[in-house]
Amino acid sequence: MYISFEQLPQSARIWIYQANRTLTDNEVSLVETALQPAVTKWAAHGTALLASVKVLLNRFVIIALDESQYEASGCSIDASTRWFKEMGAQLNVDFFDRSQAYLDGSEIKTFSIFQPKKAIESGLIAADTIVFVNNNHIQTLADLSTNWQIKASESYLKRFFNNVNIPA
């Protein structure tokens, strides 16, 4: 059952789908409009799930679920994954992008998660660069509000700042 994103409790579980490119405003509208009926019908073992969807920063699609009502099952999570595969094919977007997103001014950019040391050494990422933390660390709406956009030096990248040669 669909509910407004703002009406969900801070304890709501979330899944973050990162697009491999910035979505146009038209595409954001299309994604939200297309996913709202899917979320409305979303169920686990025949029980409707109280959930919402929202696109943030034209790059990240957030599915939020009030698990105090009923928890997602493996099948319901698989169903949501299918939504993004279908939407991605329609828009020519990869919603399963696993690169590291960061802010460069007001623009969201990415680098390979396999090359954090190189990104820091080259000066692409500085200690105060804002990075977007991945799903493994962000599990609730409260986490999204407080721990999603953080300085690189406060993220998993902090260990690389002591072990790199940063050009002067």
Image: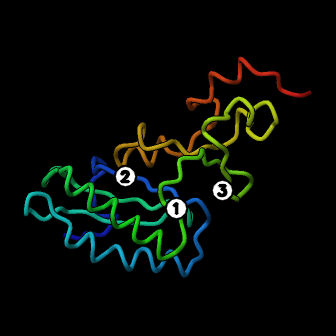
In this view, the residue farthest toward the left is 46
CA gap between label 1 and label 2 equals 15 Å
Picture quadrant where residue 149 is located: top right
* Residue 160 position (above or below residue 116): above
* Mark 2 nearby-residue class (10 Å; few <14, some 14–19, many ≥20): many
* Residue 3 position (above or below residue 16): below
Give the SS element for disc 3. Answer: strand
Quarter that holds the C terminus? top right
Q: Nearer the viewer, mark 3 or mark 1?
A: 1
Residue on which disc 3 sits: 108
Tag shown at residue 94: 1
Whether residue 139 sits left or right of residue 29 in the image: it is: left
Residue on which disc 2 sits: 15
* Residue 161 position (above or below residue 71): above
* Mark 1 nearby-residue class (10 Å; few <14, some 14–19, many ≥20): some
Amino acid type of the residue that numbered disc 1 sits on in the rendered structure = Asp
Amino acid type of the residue that numbered disc 2 sits on in the rendered structure = Trp
